[in-house]
Image (spheres, rainbow, N blue to C red):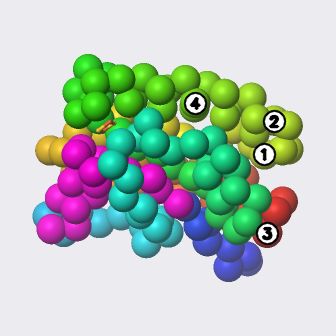
Amino acid sequence: MSDYEPLIIAYTCYWCSYTAADLAGTSRIQYPPNVRIIRVQCSGMVHPNLVIDALTKGADGVLMCGCHPGDCHYREGNLRAQARADALDLMLEDFDLEPERFRLSWVAASEGPQFAQVVKDMVEELREIGPSIYK
Ligand code: FES
């Protein structure tokens, strides 16, 4: 039996998703401890290089979370995040990485349970596909 546990880096925007992660914690909602949360001001700030860097230097998956479309505090930041996520889907193939290793999710500040569920789902998927080839 393998003792593999996936490591996920989660970029969460300050205004919504980070607050949701915080809410999940303060509400004592259980989710796997496999995630390391990095707070960014807006999901639109997460350059694809940050994601590829994480995935080629030890992370098994990267989660990017932002405000729902129309709710970004910088108006179009999450639209930029979506465009970058689309580009990342193509880049993953170039790096021989499975599509499950990157996920973009919209999580509002009040959605602590949803944040926990996104993490649970991603951990499950990553357990199934196994460790990154870059580990
Ligand atoms: Fe949350 Fe822009 S501030 S996605």
Front label number (4 vs 3): 4
Query: In this rendering, does residue 117 appear at all?
Result: no
Residue 93, labelled with which disc? Answer: 2
Q: CA distance from mark 4 to mark 3?
A: 24 Å
Q: Mark 2 falls on what kind of element?
A: helix
Q: CA distance from mark 3 to mark 1?
A: 12 Å
Q: Mark 1 falls on what kind of element?
A: loop
Of the residues under marks 4 and 3, which one precedes in the sequence?
A: 4
Of the residues under marks 2 and 4, which one precedes in the sequence?
A: 4
Give yes or no for residue 66 being in the magenta stretch. no
Which residue lies at the image location 46% right of the left edge and 67% below the top edge? 36
Percent across and percent down for residue 11 are 45, 53
Q: CA distance from mark 2 to mark 1?
A: 6 Å
Residue 135, labelled with which disc? Answer: 3
Q: CA distance from mark 3 to mark 2?
A: 17 Å
* Residue picked out by circle 1: 97
Q: CA distance from mark 4 to mark 1?
A: 16 Å
Check the picture and name the quadrant holding the N terminus. bottom right
81 sits left or right of 90 in the view: left
Which residue lies at the image location 27% right of the left edge and 51% below the top edge? 14
Whether 77 is drawn above or below 61: the answer is above
Residue 109, labelled with which disc? Answer: none
Q: Are marks 2 and 4 in contact (CB under 8 Å)?
A: no
* Residue picked out by circle 4: 84
The answer as to whether callout 4 falls within 8 Å of ligand 1 is no
Report ligand 1 position as a quadrant.
top left
Q: Amino acid at mark 2?
A: Glu
Which residue lies at the image location 42% right of the left edge and 23% below the top edge? 79
Mark count? 4
Query: In this rendering, does residue 94 appear at all?
Result: yes
Which residue lies at the image location 43% right of the left edge and 72% below the top edge? 33
Q: Are marks 2 and 1 in contact (CB under 8 Å)?
A: yes
